[in-house]
Image (spheres, rainbow, N blue to C red):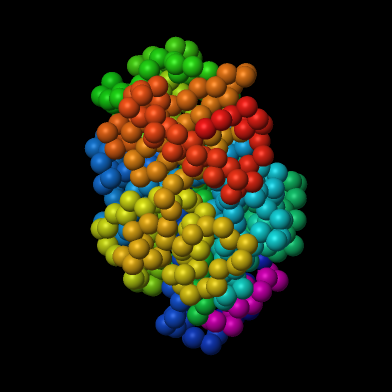
């Protein structure tokens, strides 16, 4: 390569001119003469969607949505059917969700409700970088810029924030200084966010010839509202033909403490069937569009010669109600808001398998470390799912704990879920049999036949409180 050609090549990959990753790329290209060396460690491609509920993949049972590429993940990998987020202490649920994913920490370990990830919370891309990986990022980063700068040596079209107009996303180029000043931000108007982020990931994957493995983190802002997919995708879904969810009701039956947050104002009260069908159609259109962009990324992975040696993670940061239980958002502990998709595929991962082990997003961190042979930092609280993937264990947890602000707490085991509310001094309790009632329609909390179950889960809720150091006001007048 001539000097200028090398510089242009690095620029297409999103490397800063003086970055260590850029120098490594040059050395790799020179030493290999353009031929990819065999890698001992697999690459990692991490595909992360925003507000995608667990049941929005056709291959997992939703026949009303079109998701051919997500279906491929299901057929080619291992699906965790009980993957969850732990919750949030702020209305911006995706912020702590992403902080837990990246740091492997639990909810009550976070700083600034997840807005800041301090250096002592060693992040997954940092650990991979120290282990010889080239970490590359594009898309949404809802945490602090300093944490991003510590984590990635390359990237492009980086969005620091929670949400934006999908056709006018404020983005940064990769900045080797790590400053990411506001004045350096710019827009590529007219291109949808899902295409914007996919384009640069595709460029990276097609051009990558380094002998080191890569960690490519593609963090989409879809299907988060505003739900404005290209017309082609909206035309695929006729609102009049969209079935209403079984849990559709006009209004939530009681005050859950978060009835008027921004998400809940996306449609009027009482909710109407017509409005909810329209919102679901738009939601599905966004998911089908991002699915198509994921397909483009997968093609680039194959075209670049990396497909056979890449572990792919597909997941979402939280779910969304979109009319279920009279709600629209994710500021609650129902299944539609805390239950997320999680599929892992790649070398050594069983194909077409489903695992029902209870798990969290923060478990992905130690799982990936184990799969690629990297030591897990002592700071990580997540549990590796690798033994479950390999069929060595059936579960790593007996129960899961959930929290939202100081007003909602929940716990579930393999069958039942208990949710407790404290709103304006009033306590409300729900118990659902998730096996018999996955839509959470029938509250069993006041049925005397389930008194022992309520007490048992109440004790488990208290155990989690102590284990996590949850000192919120929620517990001041609570008794199991």
76 or 241: which is nearer to us? Answer: 76
Res 455 quadrant in image = top left
Q: Magenta stretch: dominant SS?
A: helix
Q: Which residues are magenta?
A: 17-29
Residue 430, magenta (yes or no): no
Total residue callouts: 0
At a point 62% along the width and 37% down the height, the residue shown is 89
Q: Where's residue 271, x and y in %?
A: 42, 15
> Can I make out residue 210 in this image?
no
Give above or below for 414 relative to 9: above
35 or 140: which is nearer to us? Answer: 140
At a point 42% along the width and 57% down the height, the residue shown is 396
36 or 456: which is nearer to us? Answer: 456
Q: Where's residue 162, x and y in %?
A: 60, 40
Q: Where's residue 437, x and y in %?
A: 30, 31
At a point 71% along the width and 56% down the height, the residue shown is 118
> Can I make out residue 31 in this image?
yes
Residue 24, magenta (yes or no): yes
């Amino acid at each position: 390569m001539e000097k200028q050609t090398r510089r242009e090549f690095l620029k297409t990959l999103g490397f800063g001119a003086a970055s260590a990753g850029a120098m490594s790329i040059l050395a790799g290209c020179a030493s290999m003469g353009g031929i990819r060396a065999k890698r001992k460690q697999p690459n990692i491609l991490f595909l992360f969607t925003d507000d995608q509920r667990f049941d929005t993949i056709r291959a997992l049972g939703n026949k009303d949505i079109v998701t051919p590429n997500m279906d491929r993940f299901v057929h080619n990998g291992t699906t965790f059917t009980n993957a969850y987020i732990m919750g949030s202490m702020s209305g911006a649920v995706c912020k702590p969700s992403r902080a837990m994913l990246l740091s492997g920490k639990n909810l009550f370990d976070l700083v600034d409700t997840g807005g800041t990830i301090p250096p002592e919370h060693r992040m997954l891309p940092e650990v991979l970088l120290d282990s010889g990986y080239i970490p590359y990022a594009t898309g949404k980063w809802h945490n602090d810029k300093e944490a991003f700068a510590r984590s990635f040596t390359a990237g492009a079209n980086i969005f620091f924030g929670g949400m934006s107009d999908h056709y006018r996303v404020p983005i940064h180029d990769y900045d080797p200084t790590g400053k990411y000043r506001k004045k350096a931000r710019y827009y590529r108007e007219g291109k949808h966010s899902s295409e914007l982020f996919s384009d640069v990931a595709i460029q990276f994957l097609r051009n990558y010839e380094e002998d080191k493995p890569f960690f490519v983190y593609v963090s989409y802002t879809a299907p988060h509202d505003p739900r404005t997919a290209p017309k082609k995708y909206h035309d695929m879904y006729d609102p009049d033909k969209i079935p209403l969810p079984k849990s559709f009701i006009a209004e939530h039956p009681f005050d859950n403490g978060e009835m008027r947050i921004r998400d809940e104002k996306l449609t009027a009260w009482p909710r109407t069937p017509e409005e909810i069908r329209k919102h679901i159609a738009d939601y599905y259109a966004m998911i089908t569009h991002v699915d198509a962009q994921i397909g483009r990324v997968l093609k680039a992975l194959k075209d670049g010669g990396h497909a056979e040696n890449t572990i792919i993670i597909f997941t979402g940061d939280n779910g969304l109600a979109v009319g279920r239980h009279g709600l629209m958002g994710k500021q609650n502990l129902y299944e539609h808001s805390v239950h997320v998709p999680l599929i892992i595929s790649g070398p050594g991962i069983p194909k077409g398998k489903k695992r029902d082990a209870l798990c969290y997003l923060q478990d992905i961190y130690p799982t990936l470390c184990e799969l690629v042979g990297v030591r897990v930092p002592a700071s990580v609280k997540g549990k590796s799912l690798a033994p479950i993937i390999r069929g060595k264990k059936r579960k790593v947890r007996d129960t899961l704990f959930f929290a939202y602000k100081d007003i909602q707490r929940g716990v579930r085991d393999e069958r039942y879920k208990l949710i407790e509310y404290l709103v304006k001094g009033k306590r409300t309790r729900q118990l659902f049999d998730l096996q018999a009632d996955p839509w959470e329609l029938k509250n069993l909390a006041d049925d005397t036949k389930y008194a022992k179950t309520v007490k048992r889960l109440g004790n488990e809720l208290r155990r989690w409180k102590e284990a996590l150091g949850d000192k919120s006001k929620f517990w001041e007048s609570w008794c199991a």
